[in-house]
């Protein structure tokens, strides 16, 4: 049976992510963010959940960087997006009010591949943001897939390796095309 691992980084929406994935016809399991690499080999994909921490806080949730060597698709949501960026060599900076966003935002699709397959290029769609920190430099191999007026790195990806990061929450109903994004990932 195909199944997706959701590494819990403390998000209030972790169970909602699991529910959305299951409703899309794929079994999902919530596992600890420190889940072993051996266990993660049982899955067909990995989602790094959001969470209230900053990637720079002492004792913030972390994952084993070796998950990016498993050859599995990885989707980072909010904190998971920032964590993946940092672990793979990109830069995340504290928003301190300037880069922080909470609530509705609109993203524009810059590349209709990967998680935005079948989306129209330059299409605008509403999403739900909730973050203090922000990505300011992408890891090698990543490119911008969608941007908002306040965040050029709202959605990014390394399409060759099937790694994706979204600053917004695709799992909540306020993100209009959230199910389509998650379906394209799974």
Image (cartoon, rainbow, N blue to C red):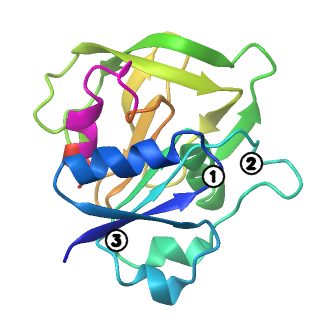
Circle 3 packing at 10 Å, graded few (<14), some (14-19), many (20+), is some
Q: Residues within 10 Å of mark 1 (few under 14, many from 20)?
A: many
- Determine the residue positioned at 35% across, 23% down: 173
First in sequence: mark 1 vs mark 3: 3
Q: Compared with residue 84, is residue 40 higher up or lower down, i.e. above or below?
A: below
Q: Position of residue 22 (x, y in %)?
A: 26, 53
The magenta-colored residue range is 172-182
Q: Is residue 36 left or right of residue 168?
A: right
Distance from Cα at disc 1 to Cα at disc 3? 17 Å
Residue position for label 1:
83
Single out the residue that lies furthest toward the right. 58
| Cα–Cα span, label 2 and label 1 | 6 Å
Q: Nearer the viewer, residue 44 or 123?
A: 44
Q: In this figure, which residue is indicated by the disc labeled 2?
A: 55
Q: Residues within 10 Å of mark 2 (few under 14, many from 20)?
A: many
Is disc 2 in contact with disc 1, using a CB cutoff of under 8 Å? yes
Q: Nearer the viewer, residue 162 or 79?
A: 79
Q: Does residue 164 lie above or below 135 as drawn?
A: below
Which numbered disc, 2 or 3, marks the residue that appears first in the sequence? 2
Q: Position of residue 128 (x, y in %)?
A: 46, 20
Among the two numbered marks 2 and 1 on one chain, the one whose residue lies closer to the N terminus: 2
Q: Quadrant of the N terminus?
A: bottom left
- Residue at image mark 3: 72
Q: Is residue 143 visible?
A: no
């Amino acid at each position: 049976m195909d199944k997706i691992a959701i590494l819990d980084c403390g998000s209030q929406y972790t169970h909602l992510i699991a529910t959305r994935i299951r409703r899309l016809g794929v079994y999902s399991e919530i596992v600890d963010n420190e889940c072993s690499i051996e266990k993660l080999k049982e899955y067909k994909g990995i989602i790094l959940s959001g969470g209230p921490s900053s990637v720079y806080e002492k004792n913030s949730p972390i994952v084993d960087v070796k998950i990016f060597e498993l050859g599995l698709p990885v989707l980072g949501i909010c904190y998971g997006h920032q964590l993946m960026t940092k672990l793979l060599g990109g830069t995340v900076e504290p928003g301190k009010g300037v880069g922080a966003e909470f609530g509705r935002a609109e993203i524009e699709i810059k590349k209709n591949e990967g998680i935005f397959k079948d989306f129209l290029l330059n299409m605008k769609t509403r999403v739900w943001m909730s973050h203090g920190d922000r990505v300011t430099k992408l890891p090698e191999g990543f490119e911008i897939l969608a941007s908002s007026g306040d965040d050029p790195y709202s959605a990014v990806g390394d399409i060759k390796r099937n790694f994706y990061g979204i600053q917004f929450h695709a799992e909540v109903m306020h993100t209009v095309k959230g199910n389509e994004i998650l379906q394209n990932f799974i």
